[in-house]
Image (cartoon, rainbow, N blue to C red):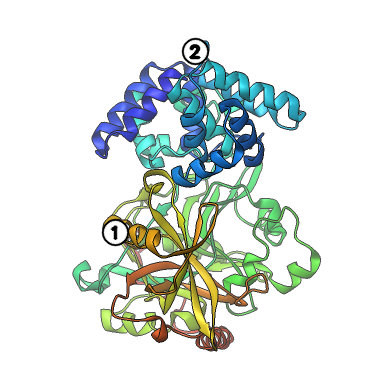
Amino acid sequence: MKRFAALFTALESTPKTGEKTAALTEYFRTAPEPDRVWTIALLSGRRPKRAVNATELRLWAAQAANVPLWLFEESYAVAGDLAETIAHLLPPATTTAAPSLESKVRALIALTGRAETERREFVLAAWRTLGSDERFLFNKLLTGGFRMGVSRGLMTRALAQATGVDNAVMAHRLMGDWDPAHTLFGDLTQDGGAETAARPYPFALASPLESGPDSLGEPDEYLAEWKWDGIRGQIIARTGAFAIWSRGEDLITDRFPEFAPLQDHLPPGTVLDGEIVAWGGTAPLPFADLQKRIGRKTVPRKLLAEAPAYFLAYDLLEDGGTDLRDAPLSHRRTRLEAVLTALPPGLPLSASPVTTGDWTQLANLRASARAQMAEGLMLKRLAAPYHTGRKRGDWWKWKLDPFTVDAVMIYAQSGHGRRANLFSDFTFALRDGNDLVPFTKAYSGLTDAEFAEITRWVGKHTLERFGPVRRVTPELVFEIGFEGIQASPRHKSGIALRFPRILRWRRDKGVAEIDTLDGLRDLLRQVSEAGALPAEGLKTGALPPDPQDI
């Protein structure tokens, strides 16, 4: 744990990517191999399940620190982070120990499901023997809130430098559902090993297009396709393996039984990249219909009928077992349509429609995206390979401007991490007659200086306190942006927003000028009616022929 804690400190102490990469590279060269595997797992989101809940931790920590629970809760409200609060309040370690990261994580995994007394004794013993930095990280693993401020791409780059493996090859080896409890370091860094027939490729990602596309060059260098609002996924059809992966590396084959017939018809050695949507027969259904299926291990028959899944294929990454990612998009797209054309009709799969045109034509097409249940357009350079991760310059997401409303802040809560001492998580309300009705939360979109100013304001305008939450005077107005809207009986407003965030602080407006809940309901009706329109605009097969196929 000491070496892992030292790595954590080094990464947290610098904002410079080069220094972070150097620290990770040195760690991957010198740390014990089992600890390297668990570090890779933790940095790629493979955290152990929580064996202890937050209520138990607060109670045990208060007792171990010999402070009343109310004082612990007040300290937690100030710190804003449970792991940090516990680390600060506990007395110094009575003995010193140097357990490995691997041993601590395996012990935590083994703790799941044990009796409370056994779990309590284990946690208290760890607190008594770990140093301050190691204790903090141990608490982070306990609470399930472990974050290291390192992107997966940066971690992969450091691992590639430490092992001499090409970065793209390393990114591919880290994909899939490998289990750190049964994986050796060599399985991830050498040919073979943990390689499986069902392993997906790293997804190519697009950069946001902040303004118009004129700066991208000539429009005939690009194709355009809808940016569908679904689940990005890959279908793997190789000899002896059929799998469906989400972009988050979740194996979701069993959640979409509609795709099972594809394993009997897709040629062996086929890998498709595309979007999973709920299908209305000729066009996607709203994302809200697909969302009902997300997170379910099994999908009831009624829901399968109401929101059948469909795969809109963007790209062909592997054809006949040959990796096509280095080929230009124009070639991959031509091969994709050839593969799909050879399939029998009636399968829940087709190529996502594409087109070309001048920037004005594409701008007009983009304006109709919501009627197609899309978020905007994707612009992809025809000569581009299929990159690993986000490589700026070849793929662009030209999203529609967000929906916006002006709302008043009514609750404020302290943030986490570097914003633990600032109020940065807010609840907003709209007018409903003479009442203010909460309708969404948001915590991003302002500068650190604005968060600091609001924090000072909250201190002077708090009406009630509920632990870390403050009810404040309804005075501060903000413009809230969001990507989607749907009815929700679980919310007091009856409405749920998709991806809400703060666009700006409206210092020029008072609470009497905020928007109304009726206005939001009208928007919901308009969006629902737009979703009933037939799909049109993009047509499959609109690309010029690829020179490699002439």
Q: Residue at x 49, y 47 (%)?
A: 77
Q: Nearer the viewer, residue 410 or 20?
A: 410
Q: Quadrant of the C terminus?
A: bottom left
- Residue type at mark 1 is Thr
Q: Residues within 10 Å of mark 1 (few under 14, many from 20)?
A: few
Q: Residue at x 36, y 81 (%)?
A: 510
Label 1: element kind: loop
Q: Is residue 498 visible?
A: no
Q: Which mark is residue 447?
A: 1
Cα distance between the residues tagged 2 and 1: 41 Å
Label 2: element kind: loop
Q: Nearer the viewer, residue 200 or 461?
A: 461
Q: Which residue is the site of mark 2?
A: 98
Q: Residue at x 77, y 29 (%)?
A: 115
What x and y, as percent, mark residue 195?
A: 54, 32
- Residue type at mark 2 is Ala
Give whichever of discs 2 and 1 has the lower sequence position: 2
